[in-house]
Image: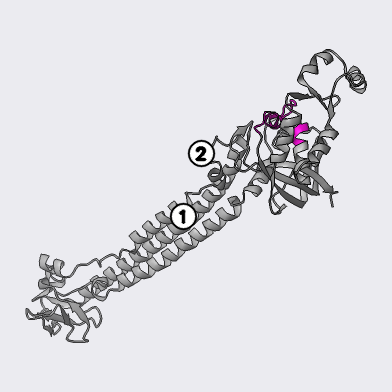
C-alpha cells in the first residue's frame, strides 16, 4: 500500500494514516471534502444538503449545531499544527552566541600566566576591557532574544489564525468534516524553521567575528597595554599622590619626571634587542663591593664608607677632591660602559639604571642585581611617540602635547620586583616634545 494519497479534487498529496480511513476530511488546498478508503484511494464526498425545517415547526437547538466530532475525528484531524523547531534552535543558538562572547581571554593574563598576580592597576585595565566585552555580549544577546520573541509571536499568531479559520469553515459547512493542519501536511513549518536557523547562524557568526576583532584590537599588543596601564589615572588620593603613583609605574623614579596621560593614540615602533653581557662583565670587575653616594654621585669602595661617616656634603667633596678616598664619578662609569662592546643605546640605558632610583625612597633593585652579578643579560627597547598627550601638573592639565619615549623590558628574565614583572613592558623614559596646540 502506498504511504501517500492524493486529493481526488485537486491532486494535493498527503501522508497515509490508518486513522483517516473511512473518515470525511477536508483538503487544505481546495477546501473540498473526501473520504479515504483502506486501499489508499480517496473518494470525493458530496456536500450534505441542509435540511429545511417545516413551516410550522422550529428546528431544535441541537439540530442547528454541527455534530460534535468523535475521539477518532479528533485523533485523525488535529486542530493544532505541529510546531516547528525553529524557536528551540533559535534559543540554543542565542545561548551559544552569548557563551562565545562571555569568555574573553585577556592577553595580559596570557602574558602573566604562571607568574605572580597582576597589580591593582592592571586589574582595572583588564576590568575595563572585560566590561567592554560584556557590554557587547549583552547587546548581542538582547538582539538575539528580541529576534526569538518576534519569531515566537509571529508563529503563535499564525497558528491561532489558522485554527480559527478551520473552525469557522467547519461550522459554516455543517458537515462532519475537519481540516488537517497545513504545517503537518504541506511541510511549511519545516521550511520556515530551516530559514530561521540559517538566519540565526549568520547572526552568531557575525557576533563571534566582532568579538575577535575587539579582542585583537584592545588587548593583542603588550606594548600598547603597558601604555594604557601607565596612563590610567587613579581616582583616590590627592593630585600629588596620583602624580607620584604615575611616576612609580616607570622603571626609574624621578620626582621631576613629567606626568603624561592620554597615550592611547601613540604610534609604537619596532622593538630592538640588546645584549647586556659586556656591561654586566665590566660592572662585576670594576664596581663589585662598591657603593654609590648620592651627594655627590660617585662610586667608592665599601670599606671607605667609614671615612665619610658623619661628614656633610661639603666635607665629602673636599675629601674626594684631595684624593683621600678612591672613587669613580657617574660620568666616568658611563664613559667606561660606552667603551665596552655594548651598543650606544644599551650603554646609556645601563648607566641610567645604575645611577637612578626605582622607587620614591631612593632604592634601586636593578643596581642591586647588577652589582651582585645577577642582572639580566638581554633587554629590549621600543620607541613610541604621539601628539595628543595630556600633561598633569599641580596647577591643572595641559592638553594636546607632543611626546616621545621608550618602553623597556628584560625578555626571558623571570621575577617580579615591587609592582613590576621584569619581562613585561614598562615606560623607561618619557619627554614632552611640543607645546599644546
Q: What number is the disc on residue 141?
A: 1
Label 2 element class: loop
**How packed is label 1: few (under 14 Cα within 10 Å), some, or many (20 or more)?**
many
Q: Which residue occupies the foreground of this view, 38 or 322? A: 322
Seen at 21% across and 86% down, the residue is 11
Q: Quadrant of residue 57?
A: bottom left
Q: Quadrant of residue 432?
A: top right
Measure the alpha-carbon separation of dots 2 and 1: 33 Å
Left or right, 73 with reference to 357: left
Tell me residue 343's x, y (percent): 76, 46
For mark 2, what is the residue? 114
In the figure, 375 relative to 342: above or below? above
Q: Which residues are magenta?
A: 352-374
**How packed is label 2: few (under 14 Cα within 10 Å), some, or many (20 or more)?**
few
Left or right, 164 with reference to 364: left
Q: Which residue occupies the foreground of this view, 381 or 75? A: 381
| Labels 2 and 1: the sequence-earlier one | 2
Which circle, 2 or 1, is nearer the viewer? 2
Q: Is 368 covered by the magenta stretch?
A: yes
Amino acid at each position: 500500500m502506498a504511504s501517500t494519497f492524493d486529493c481526488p479534487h485537486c491532486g494535493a498529496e498527503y501522508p497515509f494514516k490508518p486513522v483517516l480511513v473511512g473518515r470525511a476530511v477536508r483538503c487544505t488546498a481546495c477546501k473540498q471534502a473526501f473520504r479515504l478508503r483502506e486501499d489508499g484511494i480517496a473518494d470525493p464526498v458530496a456536500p450534505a444538503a441542509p435540511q429545511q425545517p417545516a413551516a410550522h415547526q422550529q428546528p431544535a437547538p441541537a439540530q442547528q449545531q454541527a455534530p460534535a466530532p468523535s475521539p477518532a475525528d479528533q485523533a485523525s484531524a488535529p486542530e493544532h499544527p505541529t510546531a516547528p523547531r525553529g524557536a528551540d534552535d533559535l534559543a540554543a543558538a542565542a545561548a551559544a552566541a552569548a557563551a562565545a562572547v562571555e569568555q574573553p581571554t585577556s592577553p595580559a593574563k596570557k602574558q602573566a600566566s604562571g607568574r605572580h598576580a597582576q597589580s591593582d592597576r592592571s586589574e582595572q585595565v583588564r576590568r575595563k576591557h572585560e566590561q567592554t566585552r560584556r557590554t557587547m555580549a549583552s547587546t548581542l544577546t538582547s538582539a538575539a532574544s528580541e529576534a526569538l520573541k518576534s519569531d515566537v509571536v509571529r508563529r503563535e499568531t499564525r497558528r491561532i489564525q489558522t485554527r480559527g479559520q478551520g473552525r469557522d469553515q467547519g461550522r459554516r459547512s455543517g458537515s462532519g468534516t475537519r481540516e488537517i493542519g497545513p504545517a503537518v501536511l504541506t511541510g511549511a513549518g519545516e521550511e520556515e524553521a530551516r530559514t530561521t536557523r540559517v538566519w540565526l547562524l549568520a547572526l552568531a557568526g557575525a557576533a563571534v567575528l566582532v568579538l575577535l576583532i575587539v579582542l585583537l584590537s584592545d588587548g593583542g599588543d603588550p606594548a600598547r597595554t603597558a601604555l594604557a596601564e601607565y596612563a590610567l589615572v587613579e581616582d583616590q588620593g590627592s593630585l600629588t599622590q596620583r602624580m607620584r603613583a604615575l611616576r612609580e609605574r616607570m622603571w626609574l623614579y624621578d620626582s621631576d619626571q613629567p606626568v603624561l596621560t592620554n597615550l592611547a593614540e601613540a604610534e609604537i615602533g619596532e622593538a630592538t634587542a640588546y645584549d647586556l653581557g659586556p656591561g654586566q662583565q665590566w660592572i662585576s670587575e670594576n664596581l663589585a663591593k662598591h657603593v654609590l653616594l648620592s651627594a655627590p654621585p660617585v662610586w667608592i669602595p665599601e670599606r671607605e664608607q667609614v671615612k665619610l661617616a658623619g661628614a656633610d656634603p661639603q666635607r665629602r667633596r673636599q675629601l674626594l677632591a684631595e684624593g683621600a678616598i678612591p672613587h669613580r664619578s657617574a660620568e666616568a662609569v658611563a664613559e667606561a660602559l660606552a667603551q665596552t662592546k655594548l651598543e650606544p643605546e644599551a650603554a646609556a640605558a645601563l648607566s641610567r639604571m645604575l645611577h637612578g632610583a626605582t622607587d620614591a625612597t631612593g632604592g634601586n633593585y636593578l643596581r642591586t642585581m647588577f652589582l651582585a652579578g645577577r642582572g639580566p643579560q638581554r633587554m629590549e627597547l621600543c620607541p613610541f611617540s604621539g601628539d595628543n598627550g595630556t600633561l598633569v601638573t599641580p596647577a591643572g592639565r595641559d592638553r594636546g602635547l607632543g611626546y616621545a619615549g621608550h618602553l623597556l623590558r628584560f625578555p626571558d628574565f623571570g621575577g617580579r620586583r615591587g609592582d613590576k614583572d621584569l619581562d613585561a613592558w614598562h615606560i623607561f623614559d618619557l619627554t614632552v616634545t611640543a607645546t599644546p596646540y
